[in-house]
């Protein structure tokens, strides 16, 4: 009969193969898990590479060149600031008063003619010897206008037309004596600079209403309004309109009309500008 000790030893001997087998099996399982994990990573990597290759293939097919295209990130070019072009500053020309004569103090030997129009202004004076007398063409046009005005009840009169160089000298000197040169230069031309010397300027008023002769009030009379609205039909323009003193050099003169011919007068009237602006003088 075996002793208890011998039985215990025999049981231990029987358990040992199972322990070894279990340990080996555990090691095998661990190795298997590690191997599977590594293979899963390789599979994922392979799938990602395959996906990239597929996208490249599609790009090649869409391009149609048959060549592999590797799209690289496009480097953004720096935005260049376009310099703002500064417009040249145009200084306003002020021809009013004595300022308009600056730089034009010497009388020329020949008159300035532009588009067939004799020019007389502070910038473009006339020779002292220029003496054409009153224009017959301008007089005929005025007579036609005056006849038309009578149908509306206005009796027009041209109370001042041609003035010689000498006569303009007398007038200007008188105005300077009475009002001073600064004031005179606003409403009276110095000798050689007057439109009246061309024989084409007509100072117009209404018969029996002499109180409005050579006054701004003429522009407020019914006769003055009629002339302003109809003079261009007969070749005349209001030479010094209201608000244009810096351009023309003279204050508002609703009585002073200049003959330039029917065609040009119509254009200037419709443009609603001064003769300086229309002819770019």
Image (tube, rainbow, N blue to C red):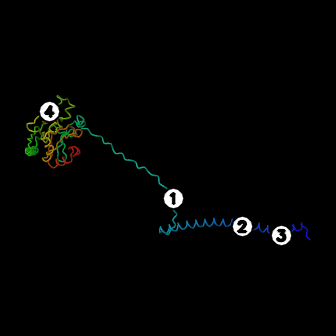
**Residue at point 59%, 67% (across, down):** 47
Q: Nearer the viewer, mark 2 or mark 4?
A: 2
Find out whether the residues at labels 3 and 1 contact each other: C-beta distance under 8 Å.
no
Residue farthest along the bottom direction in this orientation: 1
Q: Which mark is residue 131?
A: none
Find out whether the residues at labels 3 and 2 contact each other: C-beta distance under 8 Å.
no
Q: Secondary structure at mark 3?
A: helix
For marks 1 and 2 on the same chain, the one whose residue lies earlier in the sequence: 2
**Can you identify the residue that label 1 sits on?**
73
Q: Is residue 67 left or right of residue 172?
A: right
Q: Position of residue 114 (x, y in %)?
A: 19, 46
Q: CA distance from mark 3 to mark 2?
A: 24 Å
Q: CA distance from mark 1 to mark 2?
A: 47 Å
Q: CA distance from mark 3 to mark 1?
A: 71 Å
**Can you identify the residue that label 3 sits on?**
14
Q: Nearer the viewer, residue 257 or 220?
A: 220
User: Which of the 4 quarters of the picture holds residue 126?
Assistant: top left
Q: Which mark is residue 29?
A: 2
Q: CA distance from mark 1 to mark 4?
A: 86 Å
Label 3: how many residues lie within 10 Å, few (<14), some (14-19) or many (20+)? Answer: few
**Can you identify the residue that label 4 sits on?**
171
Q: Nearer the viewer, residue 253 or 211?
A: 211
For marks 3 and 1 on the same chain, the one whose residue lies earlier in the sequence: 3
Q: CA distance from mark 4 to mark 3?
A: 153 Å
- Residue 152, above or below 1: above
For marks 2 and 4 on the same chain, the one whose residue lies earlier in the sequence: 2
Q: Position of residue 64 (x, y in %)?
A: 47, 69
């Amino acid at each position: 009969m075996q002793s208890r000790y011998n039985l215990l030893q025999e049981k231990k001997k029987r358990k040992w193969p199972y322990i070894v087998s279990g340990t080996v099996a555990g090691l095998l399982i661990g190795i298997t898990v590690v191997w599977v994990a590594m293979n899963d990573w390789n599979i994922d990597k392979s799938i990602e590479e395959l996906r990239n290759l597929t996208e490249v293939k599609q790009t090649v097919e869409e391009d149609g060149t048959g060549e592999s295209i590797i799209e690289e990130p496009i480097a953004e070019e720096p935005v260049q600031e376009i310099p703002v072009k500064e417009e040249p500053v145009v200084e306003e020309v002020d021809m009013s008063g004595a300022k308009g004569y600056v730089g034009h103090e010497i009388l020329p030997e020949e008159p300035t003619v532009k588009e067939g129009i004799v020019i007389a202004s502070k910038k473009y004076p006339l020779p002292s010897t220029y003496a054409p007398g009153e224009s017959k063409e301008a007089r005929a046009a005025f007579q036609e206008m005056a006849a038309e005005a009578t149908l509306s009840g206005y009796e027009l009169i041209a109370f001042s037309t041609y003035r010689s160089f000498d006569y303009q000298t007398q007038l200007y000197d008188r105005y300077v004596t009475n009002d001073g040169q600064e004031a005179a230069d606003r409403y009276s031309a110095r000798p050689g600079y007057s439109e009246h010397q061309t024989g084409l300027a007509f100072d117009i008023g209404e018969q029996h209403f002499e109180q409005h002769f050579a006054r701004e009030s003429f522009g407020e009379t019914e006769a003055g309004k009629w002339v302003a609205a109809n003079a261009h039909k007969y070749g005349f323009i209001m030479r010094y309109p209201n608000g244009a003193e810096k351009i023309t050099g003279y204050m508002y003169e609703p009585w002073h009309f200049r003959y330039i011919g029917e065609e040009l007068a119509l254009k200037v009237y419709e443009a609603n500008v001064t003769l300086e602006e229309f002819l770019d003088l």
